[in-house]
Image: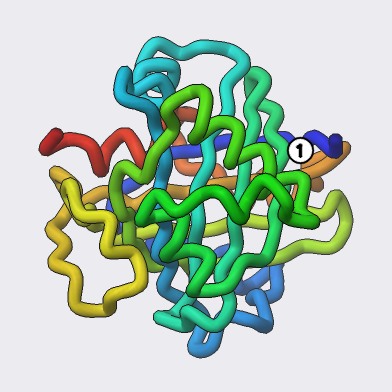
């Protein structure tokens, strides 16, 4: 399991504008981001005791979360993901699933999962069947990604975070969403073995410090 360093900073919109210019000067934009940004829709899973949410709020050092997501409204490419965190180190495992499979998961039609060729799909099956994991809420946001090859660095600027409240109608473009509390912008910095000085300097914002921020947690603000 490959682990990466990850830092998150809650920043102002003005900070985001300043960073956008700095990052563009020293990093290249992700080629998959048409126009420099893309939309992400995720559906997060939790159990009836809100285990993932409580562990995040309580700052549990080792935790994991499951989600499914797609980009720019394209349900032809959906990923199931498990993100694990140990302190400030993270890892992510992914598996491609179809829109039909995603809908079956959402609807609780799980039997097909136990014979899937994907280890991750089978793991989610076990967590849903025996740990009570279930779809919990939709999270939408806009992401601007920047890449720097040395250190395998990825810096992202996330904004317009919206929650689907209690809806799990993940595949519908018409599902209503609302702003997730006070509108926040999030700077995320991820790297492998080292963070090059040129990137470290570019993301400096004076008094801004790393925060324990979760889009899933902020999207649960209304319940």
Above or below, 65 against 146 in this view is above
Helix or strand or loop: what does disc 1 sit on?
strand
The outermost residue toward the front is: 111
Above or below, 84 against 24 in this view is above
Quadrant housing residue 44: top left
Above or below, 128 against 60 in this view is below
Where is residue 163 drawn, in percent x and y?
A: 22, 53
Return the residue nearer the eye: 78 or 150: 78
- Residue beneath disc 1: 4
In the image: residue 162, left or right of residue 106? left
Q: The N terminus lies in which quarter of the figure?
A: top right
Where is residue 194 drawn, in percent x and y?
A: 84, 39
Taking the spot 27% from the left edge, 79% from the top edge, the residue there is 173
Taking the spot 33% from the left edge, 23% from the top edge, the residue there is 50
- Numbered circles on residues, count: 1
Where is residue 32 drawn, in percent x and y?
A: 63, 81
Taking the spot 58% from the left edge, 77% from the top edge, the residue there is 77
Q: Residues within 10 Å of mark 1 (few under 14, many from 20)?
A: some
Where is residue 135 drawn, in percent x and y?
A: 36, 45
Q: Is residue 207 visible?
A: no
Image colouring: rainbow
Taking the spot 78% from the left edge, 42% from the top edge, the residue there is 195
């Amino acid at each position: 399991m490959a682990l990466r360093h990850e830092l998150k900073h809650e920043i102002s919109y003005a900070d985001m504008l300043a960073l956008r210019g700095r990052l563009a000067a020293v990093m290249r934009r992700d080629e998959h981001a048409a126009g420099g940004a893309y939309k992400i829709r995720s559906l997060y899973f939790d159990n009836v005791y809100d285990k993932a949410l409580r562990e995040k709020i309580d700052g549990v050092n080792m935790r994991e979360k499951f989600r499914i997501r797609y980009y720019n409204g394209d349900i032809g490419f959906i990923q199931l993901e498990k993100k694990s965190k140990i302190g400030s180190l993270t890892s992510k495992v992914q598996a491609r699933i179809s829109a039909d499979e995603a809908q079956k998961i959402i609807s609780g039609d799980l039997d097909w999962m136990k014979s899937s060729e994907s280890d991750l799909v089978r793991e989610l099956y076990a967590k849903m069947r025996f740990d009570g994991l279930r779809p919990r809420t939709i999270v939408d946001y806009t992401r601007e990604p920047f890449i720097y090859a040395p250190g395998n660095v990825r810096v992202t600027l996330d904004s317009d975070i919206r929650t689907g409240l209690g809806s799990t109608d993940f595949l519908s473009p018409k599902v209503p969403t609302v702003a997730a509390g006070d509108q926040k912008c999030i700077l995320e910095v991820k790297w492998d073995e080292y963070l090059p000085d040129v990137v470290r300097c570019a993301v400096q914002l004076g008094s801004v410090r790393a925060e324990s921020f979760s889009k899933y947690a902020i999207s649960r603000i209304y319940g």
